[in-house]
Image (cartoon, rainbow, N blue to C red):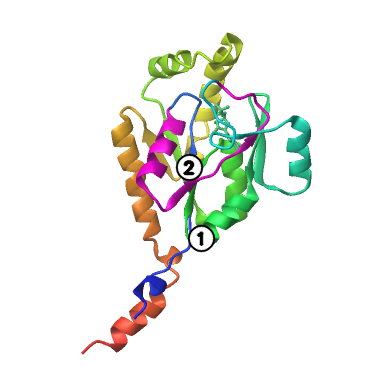
Amino acid sequence: MDHENELQRRGLMLVLSSPSGAGKTTLARRLVEIDKDLRISISVTTRAPRQNEVNGRDYHFVSEDVFHSMADSGQFLEHARVFGHFYGTPIQTVKESLSNGSDILFDIDWQGAQQITEHARNDVVKIFVLPPSTDELARRLRTRAQDPKRVLSERMAKAADEITHWPEYDYVIVNEDLEIATNQINNILCAERLRRHRRTGLSRFVERLTKNTP
Ligand code: 5GP
């Protein structure tokens, strides 16, 4: 009996959003490290790379002209302007990952989360990550020394704005301790993978189980 096939499931799209500095990018990296069925979606952006950021690993860094031509030719699943720069999720890699049976993790803002939900409501799980306090948020943003001061204060001011979108998410995590927050998200992922509507092979599996009952 081909159990693997019968217990097939639909891939899911896990969206992580948060104000800048809540630790979402670190969380995202940890999650894909510990879960081999989870791939991270690498966005395209027009902002300049920060120190230590690698093209193709952290983002695909492109000019505004390239970004707009990609948007015009339908290459993005969603795209948005965030802090004066453009960001977009390439549609092709999402399709490939889902068809290969991988789940996809998106580190995107609330605008992107809304757009993806419009496309694929049943396949999206949205988690909002909050910092433990304003002081901690400010501290984390200050340690990102690469950002010019003006951008930092702008991001701090926008954090409150971003946080107002928390009710649009399925789950909310307070990231005080990276290990705990990672486990919480991992638990959500495990439970969401078991949801009945994602388990496309379940009917056949149960049918066989009931037929084989002695
Ligand atoms: P950063 O410039 O700090 O890497 O990201 C700034 C914000 O843009 C973060 O909230 C991040 O989640 C969001 N972001 C990154 N990539 C995308 C994307 O492809 N689409 C959208 N809508 N937001 C993104």
Q: Amino acid at mark 1?
A: Asn
* In the foreground, 113 or 70: 70
Given the current orientation, which residue lies at the most extreme left position? 214
Q: Position of residue 29 (x, y in %)?
A: 43, 37
Split into quadrants, the picture shows ligand 1 in the one at top right
Q: Assess whether residue 46 is covered by the magenta stretch.
A: yes
Q: Assess whether residue 7 is covered by the magenta stretch.
A: no
Q: Position of residue 7 (x, y in %)?
A: 38, 70
- Would residue 43 be found to the left or right of residue 206 on screen? right
Q: Position of residue 72 (x, y in %)?
A: 78, 44
Q: Secondary structure at mark 2?
A: loop
Q: Mark 2 or mark 1, which is nearer to you?
A: 1
Distance of mark 2 from mark 1, alpha carbons? Answer: 26 Å
> Which residue range is magenta in the image?
23-50
Q: Where 195 sits versus 83, above or below?
A: below
Disc on res. 188: none
Quarter of the picture containing the C terminus is bottom left
Report the residue at 55% width, 25% height from top.
161
* In the foreground, 171 or 204: 204
Q: Which residue is mark 1?
A: 100
Q: Amino acid at mark 2?
A: Tyr
Q: Where 141 sits versus 180, above or below?
A: above
Disc on res. 169: 2
Report the residue at 65% width, 26% height from top.
47
Given the current orientation, which residue lies at the most extreme top position? 149
> Badge 1 local density, few (<14 within 10 Å), some, or many (20+)?
few
